[in-house]
């Protein structure tokens, strides 16, 4: 699969703040790529650099086969962006702004625009002065989704949306994937990324700390298991690969990494397991593994 | 495909025009209307040449007016008189039009984050700057064109009209370029405005000193000085207009260079880190308002004090150059006063208006905070709306007082040091008197914010308009009631006149009324 965005060893400083520290990112064509990290980790900075709005202090960025700092206008014809803080012209209505952005991106699909306005329940006749944060985000989002582009860069697009709108957003994202568009979705909400994304990059203090497709990453994380056994094994302490072990009567709770799962199952069987509940690793576990302690 | 980038650029120009249309139209109308109207009123006021000759003798030797208006070139003609009356004033206003418009549409949009949204579309990175500059150039061009047209229709010779209109437009254009650079240097629109206004103040001071001392070459360092060298109505030198073009092209190239080498949202200077915890000041609404505005008020105070000191230091030269002339005194409406007194009174009037503008800006922050939604955070903490506006009004009043006192005393003390005959007491009295209309204007701005928030944009035009009524009303033979609408019509001209306490008390009461109305209206 072709690479749509590749950042290698990108560094960015703001005065004494090191916002990106030899940061890497690979986004492949056709995927929804989750970009996870807590506030201040450098997500917005990375997206702005991918757009060529900020200049790299070091490293290399390739966007849609070009250099975003040098070829920004041509490359921008093929993408749409929703900033983390959407700021609009207070005097213009939401509908006007959607059309303006669409025209600048080389045309807007009018039927899709109207359908999206309907779905997101936006009043396009109100002046944007009176819009809430969520409504401003909807304006930028509708303009992006209704444009005919290959790549969507979305910076925490749901942070101002209510749960109802969020589910509409998720539906829209699935439609985008079916249409073959690539999406880079930054978020600090694990559930959202888990529900939508094919692969994930986790950023922490300007560095990539984890990346890969969701299935592989799950493999790295532990499965949580609750088992009822006929007797608690005496050598439980020496079972390798177990963490967070707790016993309560004949019930045993622990987390185990994928590489030790098979061996542990054998041991549970010989301990006379009578009931077993297993929770697959969630992204949350992945995340906490990076940020915990 | 070849046309697409072009059409996108014009989309942004059209957007800028759409956003600025009312403001810019108002500016253009005022600026283009003034020269022809003044020309016509002089034409009917001084119909015969004997009258003009006596006026010419009176004004030509008066250096105190030279400081404000520049030297009087051949004011024995109607055109010369017109140019002398409105050239400098209109040129400064054209510069203010350019600064506010260009900064709002460049750094203003960038600071708000709108440029980030546009920056992600297929626009070249310099589009925002270029569109703001095109808008500014268009506005100045229209001011020049319409002024020339109006003057010719009013009966001015073509060459003179070209010189006068061209000079005003030329200053407008030069300050479009100055603002374009200022917008690259700083990260906020407010500080970009400050940088450009400081350049304007320096340009004014350079030519004021150049005109009144032997350091005449200083004029050539200032775009405002070039306007005088054109000498529209006698020995016109239109070729000097090229200097505006050359300066603008150089500055615009510099602005583009700075833009291409910087990040979106960044300036030339890296922001310092601030304190991690709130100091003692940040324990009340007034403390917050003061914290937000103190920096700007200090910039105003330092800028105007420097300006006052420069102007004050030439007072003695002015007084010795001028001959006391009764016609002149009558026209200045300031009889029985020495030239030194007249000069100081005029300058204090101007500083009073500028100090009012500083305070009005601080009051307008209340409106800005409400419009941006930040006020909600404060009002949700149990702070009442009255106290919220009150905090900004207090900051504006205190700020204006500080700005006027520091700049007024700088002017007066520099005059004293230069050997002019004024007493500190008379100076203090004069500053005290000028403080009254200044604070009334600040209270009026608060009344607009409190009672008619949608009309808040009129607060600064109100200050400028008030000043214009006083400086041009008599000439235009406006009816008395209209002239009386200006607060400055009711203050005695000090030093040199007599203080009319009753009028001042009345004016103070009006100010208090406006302040009360603003708080109740909120
Ligand atoms: N323009 C800027 N000037 C100074 N520091 C900045 C600027 N933009 C971002 N930073 C800093 O860079 C770091 C990363 O910020 P950001 O990319 O906005 O994080 P995120 O989007 O993940 O919340 C933060 O420490 C932030 O304070
Ligand atoms: Mg962010």
Image (spheres, helix red, strand yellow):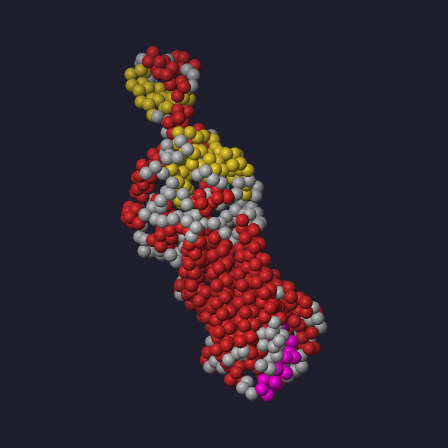
Q: Which residues are magenta?
A: B49-67
Q: Tell me if residue A211 can be seen.
A: yes
Q: Residue at x 71, y 73 (%)?
A: B419
Give x and y (percent) for residue A232: 36, 15
Give x and y (percent) for residue B332: 58, 80
Quarter of the figure with the N terminus of chain A: top left
Q: Residue at x 35, y 22 (%)?
A: A225
Front in this rendered view, residue B295 or A235 = B295
Quadrant in the rendering for residue B83 = bottom right
Please give left or right for residue A276 compared with residue B119 in the image.
left
Magenta-colored stretch includes residue B131: no
Q: Tell me if residue B515 can be seen.
A: no
Give x and y (percent) for residue B330: 58, 83
Magenta-colored stretch includes residue B55: yes
**Taking A186 as reference, is B406 above or below it?**
below
Q: Main secondary structure of the magenta part?
A: helix
Give x and y (percent) for residue B290: 52, 57
Q: Residue at x 64, y 67 (%)?
A: B219
Extreme residue toward the front, this view: B2
Front in this rendered view, residue B195 or B397 = B195
Q: How many marks?
A: 0
Quadrant in the rendering for residue A14 = top right
Q: Residue at x 39, y 48 (%)?
A: A105
**Taking A70 as reference, is B502 above or below it?**
below
């Amino acid at each position: 699969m072709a690479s749509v965005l590749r950042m290698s060893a990108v560094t960015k400083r703001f005065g004494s703040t090191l916002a990106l520290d030899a940061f890497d990112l690979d986004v492949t064509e056709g995927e929804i790529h989750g970009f996870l990290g807590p506030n201040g980790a450098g997500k917005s900075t990375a997206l702005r650099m991918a757009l060529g709005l900020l200049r790299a202090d070091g490293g290399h960025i390739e966007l849609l086969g070009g250099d975003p700092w040098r070829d920004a206008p041509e490359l921008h014809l093929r993408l749409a962006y929703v900033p983390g803080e959407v700021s609009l012209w207070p005097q213009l209505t939401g509908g006007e702004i959607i059309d303006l952005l669409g025209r600048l991106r080389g045309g807007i699909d009018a039927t899709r625009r109207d359908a999206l306005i309907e779905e997101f329940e936006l009043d396009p006749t109100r002046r944007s002065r009176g819009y809430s944060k969520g409504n401003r985000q909807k304006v930028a989002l509708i303009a992006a989704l209704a444009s005919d582009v290959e790549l969507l860069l979305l910076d925490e697009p749901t942070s101002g949306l209510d749960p109802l709108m969020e589910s509409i957003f998720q539906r829209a994202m699935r439609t985008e994937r079916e249409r073959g568009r690539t999406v880079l979705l930054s978020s600090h909400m694990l559930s959202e990324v888990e529900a939508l994304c094919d692969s994930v990059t986790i950023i922490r203090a300007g560095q990539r700390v984890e990346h890969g497709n969701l299935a592989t990453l799950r493999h790295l994380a532990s499965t949580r298991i609750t088992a009822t056994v006929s007797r608690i094994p005496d050598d439980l302490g020496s079972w390798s690969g177990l963490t967070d072990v707790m016993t309560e009567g004949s019930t045993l709770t622990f987390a185990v990494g994928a590489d030790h799962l098979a061996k542990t199952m054998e041991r549970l069987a010989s301990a006379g397991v009578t009931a077993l509940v297993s929770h697959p690793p969630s992204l949350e576990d992945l995340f906490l593994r990076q940020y915990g302690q | 495909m070849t046309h697409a980038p072009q059409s996108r650029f014009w989309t942004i120009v059209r957007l800028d025009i759409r956003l600025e249309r009312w403001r810019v139209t108002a500016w253009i109308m005022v600026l283009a209307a003034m020269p022809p109207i003044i020309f016509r009123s002089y034409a009917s006021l001084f119909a015969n040449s004997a009258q003009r000759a006596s006026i010419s003798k009176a004004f030509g030797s008066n250096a105190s007016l030279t400081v404000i208006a520049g030297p009087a070139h051949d004011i024995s003609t109607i055109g010369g008189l017109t140019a002398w009356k409105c050239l400098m004033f209109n040129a400064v206003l054209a510069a203010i039009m350019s600064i506010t418009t260009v900064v709002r549409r460049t750094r203003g949009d960038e600071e708000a984050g709108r440029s980030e949204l546009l920056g992600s579309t297929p626009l070249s990175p310099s589009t925002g700057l270029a569109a703001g500059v095109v808008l500014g150039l268009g506005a100045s061009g229209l001011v020049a064109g319409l002024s020339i047209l109006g003057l010719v229709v009013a009966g001015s010779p073509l060459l003179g009209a070209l010189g006068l209109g061209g000079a005003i437009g030329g200053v407008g254009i030069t300050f479009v370029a100055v603002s374009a650079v200022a917008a690259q240097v700083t990260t906020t629109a407010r500080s970009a405005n400050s940088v450009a206004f400081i350049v304007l103040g320096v340009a004014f001071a350079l030519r004021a000193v150049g005109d009144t001392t032997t350091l005449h070459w200083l004029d050539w360092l200032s775009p405002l000085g070039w306007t005088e060298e054109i000498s529209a109505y006698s020995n016109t030198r239109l070729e000097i207009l090229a200097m505006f073009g050359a300066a603008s092209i150089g500055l615009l190239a510099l602005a583009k260079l700075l833009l291409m080498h910087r990040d979106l949202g960044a300036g030339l200077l890296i922001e310092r880190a601030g304190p991690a915890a709130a100091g003692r000041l940040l324990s009340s609404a007034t403390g917050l308002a003061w914290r937000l505005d103190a920096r700007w008020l200090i910039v105003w105070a330092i800028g105007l004090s420097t300006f006052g000191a420069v102007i004050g230091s030439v007072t003695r030269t002015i007084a010795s150059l001028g001959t006391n002339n009764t016609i002149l005194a009558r026209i200045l409406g300031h009889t029985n006063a020495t030239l030194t007194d007249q000069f100081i009174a005029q300058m204090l009037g101007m500083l009073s208006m500028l100090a009012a503008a500083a305070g009005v800006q601080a009051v307008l922050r209340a409106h800005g905070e409400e419009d941006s939604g930040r006020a909600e955070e404060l009002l949700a903490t149990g702070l009442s709306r009255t106290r919220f506006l009150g905090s900004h009004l207090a900051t504006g009043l205190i700020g204006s007082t500080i700005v006027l006192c520091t700049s007024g005393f700088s002017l007066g003390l520099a005059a004293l040091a230069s050997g002019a005959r004024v007493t500190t007491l008379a100076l203090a009295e004069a500053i005290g008197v000028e403080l009254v209309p200044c604070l009334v204007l600040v209270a009026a701005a608060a009344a607009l914010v409190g009672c008619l928030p949608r009309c808040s944009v009129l607060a600064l035009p109100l200050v400028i308009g008030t000043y214009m009524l006083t400086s041009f009303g008599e000439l235009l033979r406006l009816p008395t009631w209209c002239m009386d609408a200006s607060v400055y019509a009711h203050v005695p001209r000090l030093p040199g006149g007599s203080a009319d306490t009753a009028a001042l008390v009345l004016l103070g009461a009006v100010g208090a009324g406006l302040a009360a109305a603003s708080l109740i209206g909120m």
